Image (cartoon, rainbow, N blue to C red):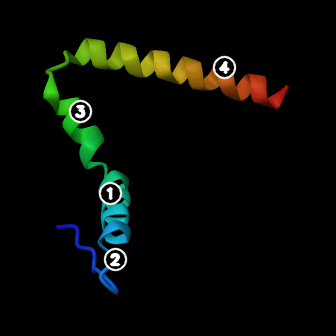
Amino acid sequence: MTKVEVTNGNIDGALKRFKVKVARSGVPSELKKRKHYEKPGVRRREAKKEMIRNARRAARKNR
């Protein structure tokens, strides 16, 4: 469970810290992934495309 303490009545700051903590924990992306079922083959294909994209970016950056 993610907890954030409110200091000096600063609710806006606490809310901002809470959102950052939740985002870093990976809850929103996990929820997005689980919203629709994705076949294993499709998942592998997308991962392969992502790896190719990252390799191209790295090659372009190293030039």
Q: Give amino acid for label 3.
A: Lys
Upstream in sequence: badge 4 or badge 2: 2
Residue named by callout 3: 32
For the residue pair 17 and 2, the one nearer the viewer reads as: 17
Upstream in sequence: badge 4 or badge 3: 3
Tag count in the figure?
4
Q: Is residue 31 left or right of residue 54?
A: left
Gap in angstroms between the C-alphas marked 3 and 1: 16 Å
Gap in angstroms between the C-alphas marked 2 and 1: 15 Å
Q: Give amino acid for label 1.
A: Lys
Residue named by callout 2: 10
- CB atoms at circles 2 and 1 under 8 Å apart? no
Gap in angstroms between the C-alphas marked 4 and 2: 45 Å
Residue named by callout 4: 56
Residue 53, above or below 18: above
Q: Secondary structure at mark 4?
A: helix
